[in-house]
Image (cartoon, helix red, strand yellow):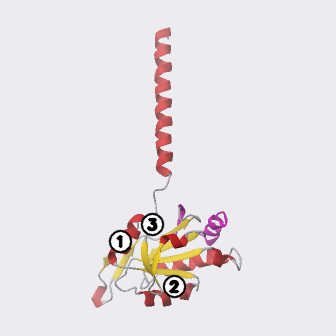
Amino acid sequence: MSRTMKALLAVWIAVLVGAAGWIGWDAWQGKQPSLGGPFALVDQNGKPFSSDRLKGKPTLIYFGYAFCPDVCPTSLLLMETAIEQLGPDVPKKVNLVFITIDPERDTPELIKGYVENFSPSFIGLTGTPEQIAQAARAYRVYYQKRPGKDGDPYLMDHSSIVYVLDRNGRFVTHFTHEAKAEAIAKAVQRLL
Ligand code: NI
């Protein structure tokens, strides 16, 4: 290889390494979550509830609906189980939040009865369809009404994610409803 070729090769390698580094940096920046953000909803007592109220404690949030036959109950039970594993006093130190994506049926009264079945410490939130849409958009939650079969009540298709927020209300990580309670407990433990 001639000296010129070697020099050219060296330059080319430098360009490639630089490009790879740049792409890596970009990907890393992309990983910085732009997920979550403020919302204004209504709690299970019919009172306005702003996301600022979650600050000061780590938070687990799940979007679903009370009529959900399977995935929602599994997820809420998972959240509750995870927190209980951390000790008897921990449930008071963590916000457990359920946000409905079916505000049409999930009134504050209905949500109150629903979430308290899982844990008395659950915060159940509803709101106007616009308020729910805003909160769901912030967390990139998908939901869609699906007509029931043979005159059955409608169902809601929805994404099923447990979001973990730190004490400042910032998104940290997420789990699916298939996660192990231990894994969620560990993630919360780090934030306590
Ligand atoms: Ni569901």
User: Could you tell me which secondary element the residue under label 3 belongs to?
Assistant: loop
Q: Is 84 located above or below residue 135 in the figure?
A: below
Residue 174 visible in the shown view: yes
- Give, as a three-letter code, the residue at label 2: Val
Report the residue at 33% width, 77% height from top: 129
Judge by depth and name the residue closer to the eye, 53 or 109.
53
Judge by depth and name the residue closer to the eye, 19 or 137.
137
Position in image of residue 23 (x %, y %): 46, 39
Judge by depth and name the residue closer to the eye, 150 or 124.
124
Q: What stretch is highlighted in magenta?
A: 171-192
- Residue highlighted by disc 2: 115
- Residue highlighted by disc 1: 133
Label located before the other in sequence (3 or 2): 3
Q: Distance between the residues labelled 3 and 2?
A: 22 Å
Q: How far apart are marks 1 and 2 (CA)?
A: 21 Å
- Give, as a three-letter code, the residue at label 3: Pro
- Give, as a three-letter code, the residue at label 1: Ala
Q: Is 155 located above or below residue 136 in the figure?
A: below
Q: In which quarter of the image is the C terminus?
A: bottom right
- Side (left or right) of 45 relative to 158: right
Q: Which quadrant would residue 173 be assigned to in this image?
A: bottom right
Position in image of residue 26 (x %, y %): 46, 43
- Residue highlighted by disc 3: 38
Report if residue 137 lies within the magenta region: no
